[in-house]
Amino acid sequence: MSKITAAITAVGGYVPDFVLSNKVLETMVETNDEWITSRTGIKERRILKDEGKGTSFLAIKAAEDLIQKKGLDPKEIELVIVCTATPDMKAASTAAYTATQIGAVNAFSYDLEAACSSFLFGMSTASAYIESGRYKKILLIGADKNSSFINYKDRATCIIFGDGAGAVLFEPNEEGLGLQDELLRSNGEGREFLQATYGGSSYPINADTYNEGKHYVFQDGKTVFKNAVFNMADVAEKILKRNNLTNDDVAWLAAHQANKRIIDATANRIDLDKKKVMMNIQKYGNTTSATLPLLLFDYESQLKKGDNIVFAAFGGGFTWGSIYFKWAYNS
Ligand SMILES: CC(C)(COP(=O)(O)OP(=O)(O)OC[C@H]1O[C@@H](n2cnc3c(N)ncnc32)[C@H](O)[C@@H]1OP(=O)(O)O)[C@@H](O)C(=O)NCCC(=O)NCCS
């Protein structure tokens, strides 16, 4: 019997309708379209404005898109993982709510959090379950409502982040397609450079801390940038080397969309043609856990069975890694 590998067999996505353009940001903070475009590659991002709607709203929409396109009976889904850094609320699993709302009544579900690397690490988790033979249908969702913890008076962060969700279905494959190799890392010394300090268990919010605004996300952009460039490029290069792949063997780079210059640096390190670099940061900004599945959502029609895809991500914590993956279908 051939070895079971974990393949992606369907993709869905969702972004909210409201567009926050660079032009509008110019009226909110001291910045300009030219600066944002040249420093980040971002032109606009989507924001979920509706009161009372959280990350699960985005996750449910992306999952429903996948279910409808694939013609999947949600009762067949065994596990729903929602990768997110912005759960709906504390103490109640966002994934549990999502699973129930989409009709995945036979599934168990949980959230997975590793900042901007959440979805990449989730790919590893979902694949391990599939490879073990324990489960056969896993819905992996990456969803974040970043606008819920962004300070729209802080130009170092509000220009970058957006809201969105993407979903993929993991199933067993007997042709050797799907996840081939992974190189995942973390280093907790990085957490001081990118965090929302208040609102977690270390520093719960009270009236005084609220006024300080430290429940919003803060970043030391330069330090995060340097670490992201070095580490994302490093793991992408290493995973190619140890699988004896050259740039000719790689069909696509699917890199976390945090800053176009970070993506370009990773592509340059592995000497990859621009045409092979998936890019949608201009439309959505950094959607944290949703960037990788939203890339698959936007590029799905161009992907061919057998295509070698190098995934790479970097995020708060710090967390980072790369996955070498073979695409399993033509759409
Ligand atoms: C945030 C980021 C875009 C800033 O770009 P940068 O090239 O590092 O810019 P700097 O912080 O060095 O700032 C350069 C100048 O632009 C100014 N500036 C910063 N933000 C600005 C903005 N939105 N508009 C206009 N000017 C801005 C700074 O004040 C600084 O001015 P000064 O030279 O007079 O002091 C960049 O550091 C970045 O993308 N970091 C990584 C972010 C990231 O990936 N986060 C998520 C990780 S998953």
Image (cartoon, grey):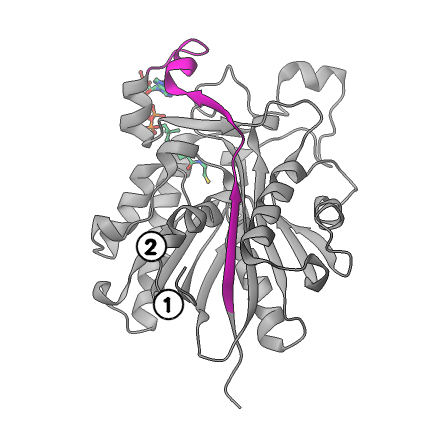
Q: Mark 2 points at which residue?
A: 302
**In what element is the residue under mark 1?**
loop
Residue 2 visible to an observer of this rendering? yes
Q: Residue at x 70, y 35 (%)?
A: 200
Q: Which of 158 and 216 is in front in this view?
A: 158
Give residue 230's position: percent from left, percent from top. Answer: 34, 48
Quadrant of the rendered image holding ligand 1? top left
Span of residues in magenta: 7-32
What amino acid is found at the position of numbered circle 2 in the picture?
Answer: Gln
Was residue 1 drawn as part of the magenta stretch in this picture? no
Quadrant assignment, res 30:
top left
User: Is disc 2 surrounded by few (<14), some (14 to 19) or many (20+) residues within 10 Å?
Assistant: few
User: Which of the image's four quarters has the C terminus?
Assistant: bottom left
Tell whether 35 sits left or right of 93.
Answer: left
Looking at the image, which residue sits at the far bottom? Answer: 1
Asked if residue 303 lies left or right of residue 192, the reply is left
Q: Can residue 316 be seen in this view?
A: no
Residue 202: mark? none
Disc 2 residue: CB within 8 Å of ligand 1: no
Q: Give residue 275's position: percent from left, percent from top.
A: 23, 50
Say whether residue 14 is magenta.
Answer: yes
Element carrying mark 2: helix
Residue 70 % position (x, y):
55, 58
**Inter-mark Cα distance, 1 to 2:** 10 Å
**Crowding at mark 1 (Cα within 10 Å: few <14, some 14-19, many 20+):** few
| Residue ID at (43%, 33%) | 284
Q: Name the residue under label 1.
A: 305
Q: Which residue is drawn at 59% across and 55% down?
A: 140
Residue found 49% across the figure and 28% down from its top: 46
| Image location (x, y in percent) of residue 171 | 57, 68
> Which of 176/106 is in front?
106
